[in-house]
């Protein structure tokens, strides 16, 4: 059996794991969900949900990975009792990773396209709102251009992963994440210096009861719970694989808190970039998913040096989305190597071909297949996203939870011993009643609300 790879440094583990969590959930979804919920209270409840739900489930994924020393299927088989079938969930994790990348690579391609457009001057001062909005419509209606950017993301991702964990994923992700953190600070400072930025900060961070009344308290809470899970990609073993590469030197609670802190920092700073800029130029921040690709470009083209700042913003977006692509690609490769005994080279070549083809339906769903609706009125991308975000993530998180705390699975005592192995923050065994009875109900609420 091949010797299992490991990270070259603890910093590498933290940055790669945080890179998996940091993605469009932080820099695209979080700002527009925050805008739709009126800022303030939503941010507060999101942070609370991340602490009481996100961190515990993250420790469970990491614990299964570190104790099982393998990707999802192999780790479950190592830890489950004879005759049990928990490892079946590992196959659904693999399906979830493929589904996620079938549309995530398309969105990452949009980021790359917009970076190129700002860099080349396609977006320029004096453009009307219709011209700016028409850029996104033009991109969606062009299957050739969209396919080109999407396939570039797929090829680049597997090219990096082909060099292995340390020489490929860890080395590139470390530089990319450090560049991302530097870029986000520069962009945030610039936004804060814009005239009228204070109103954006007030909307973003000061709780207002009026914003709660407009959408309802229940909707705000469930959106915050959903975002806490979506941002960490919990439930499809995207984080579990990095536990399998970890040493026993540090507790998993401490590592989970650090990963969540980095993830949350990027999400909050993305809001610090977007909301002051929106209020400075009189643009409504509650524009939903179109906020990044339609609303913000209107801000940049009317801003002094907007071409530069727009290019810088979408370069930051590329780093954020591509860090997740690399991490999930590594998970897919590890699953294939662990489960089927393939070499890394073989796994890279096969999965490159599979995902190059599997990403095309999402591309074509906006043009040649625009009449195709898979789940209700949803197009291809929305259908794939619905399956991952509303079904596989919460269901998978619930399965990890039950496996770690129930006597029919791995068991709470084994889980808590693995979590507390090493130096750092310890998880109290007194939390067992919360993990067994309260947390499953909270996850079920997310699942039911998402399906409804």
Image: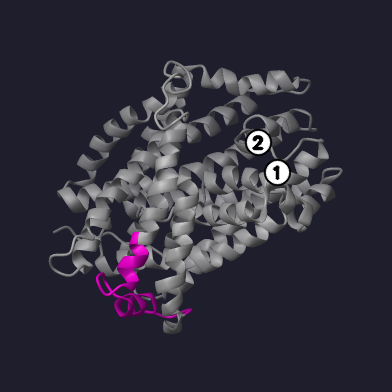
> Can I make out residue 252 in this image?
no
Helix, strand or loop at label 2? It is: helix
Tell me the quadrant of the picture where the N terminus can be found: bottom left
> Can I make out residue 423 in this image?
yes
Give me the C-alpha separation between circle 1 and circle 2.
9 Å
Q: Nearer the viewer, residue 65 or 223?
A: 223
Q: Nearer the viewer, residue 217 or 319?
A: 217
Give the vertical position of 442 relative to 392 (above or below).
below
Q: Residue furthest right?
A: 195
Crowd tier of the residue under label 2, counting other residues whose Cα lies within 10 Å: few below 14, some 14–19, many 20 or above: many
Q: Which residue is mark 2?
A: 291
Q: Nearer the viewer, residue 445 or 193?
A: 445
What percent of the width, then of the height, locates residue 247? Answer: 34, 70
Crowd tier of the residue under label 1, counting other residues whose Cα lies within 10 Å: few below 14, some 14–19, many 20 or above: many
Whether residue 295 appears in magenta in the rendering, the answer is no
In magenta, the rendered stretch is: 399-425
Disc 1 and disc 2 in contact, CB within 8 angstroms: yes
Tag nearer the camera, 1 or 2: 2
What percent of the width, then of the height, locates residue 122? Answer: 65, 20
Q: Is residue 327 left or right of residue 407?
A: right
Query: Residue sitting at 81 percent across and 36 percent down?
Result: 281
């Amino acid at each position: 059996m091949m010797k299992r790879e490991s990270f070259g440094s603890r910093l590498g583990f933290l940055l790669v794991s945080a890179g998996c969590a940091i993605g469009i959930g932080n820099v695209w979804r979080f700002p527009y969900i925050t805008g739709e919920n009126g800022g303030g209270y939503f941010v507060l409840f999101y942070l609370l949900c991340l602490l009481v739900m996100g961190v515990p489930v993250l420790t469970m994924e990491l614990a299964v990975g570190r104790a099982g020393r393998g990707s999802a299927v192999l780790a479950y088989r190592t830890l489950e009792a004879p005759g049990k079938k928990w490892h079946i969930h590992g196959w659904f994790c693999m399906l979830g990773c493929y589904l996620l990348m079938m549309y995530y690579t398309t969105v990452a391609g949009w980021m790359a396209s917009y970076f190129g457009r700002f860099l080349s001057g396609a977006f320029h001062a004096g453009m009307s709102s219709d011209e700016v909005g028409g850029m996104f419509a033009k991109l969606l209606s062009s299957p050739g251009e969209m396919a080109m950017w999407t396939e570039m993301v797929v090829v680049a991702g597997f090219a990096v992963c082909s060099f292995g964990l340390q020489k490929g994923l860890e080395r590139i992700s470390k530089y990319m994440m450090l560049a991302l953190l530097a870029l986000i600070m520069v962009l945030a400072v610039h936004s804060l210096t814009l005239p009228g930025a204070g109103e954006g900060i007030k909307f973003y961070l000061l709780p207002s009861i009026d914003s709660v009344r407009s959408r309802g308290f229940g909707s705000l809470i469930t959106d915050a719970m959903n975002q806490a899970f979506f941002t960490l990609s919990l439930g499809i073993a995207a984080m579990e694989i990095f536990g399998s590469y970890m040493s026993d030197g540090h507790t998993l609670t401490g590592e989970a808190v650090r990963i969540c802190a980095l993830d949350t920092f990027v999400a909050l700073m993305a809001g610090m970039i977007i909301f002051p800029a929106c209020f400075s130029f009189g643009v409504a921040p509650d524009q939903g998913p179109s906020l990044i690709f339609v609303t913000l470009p209107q801000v940049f083209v009317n801003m002094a040096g907007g071409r530069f700042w727009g290019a810088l913003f979408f370069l930051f977006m590329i780093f954020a989305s591509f860090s997740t692509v690399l991490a999930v690609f590594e998970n897919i490769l590890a699953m294939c190597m662990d489960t089927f005994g393939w070499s890394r080279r073989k796994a890279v070549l096969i999965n490159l071909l599979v995902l190059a083809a599997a990403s095309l339906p999402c591309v074509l769903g906006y043009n040649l297949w625009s009449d195709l609706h898979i789940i209700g009125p949803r197009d291809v991308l929305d259908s794939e996203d619905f399956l991952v975000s509303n079904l596989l993530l919460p269901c998978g998180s619930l399965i990890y939870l039950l496996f770690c705390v129930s006597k029919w699975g791995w068991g709470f005592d084994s889980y808590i011993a693995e979590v507390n192995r090493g130096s750092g923050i310890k998880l109290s065994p007194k939390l067992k009643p919360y993990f067994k009875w309260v947390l499953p109900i909270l996850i079920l609420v997310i699942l039911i609300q998402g399906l409804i």
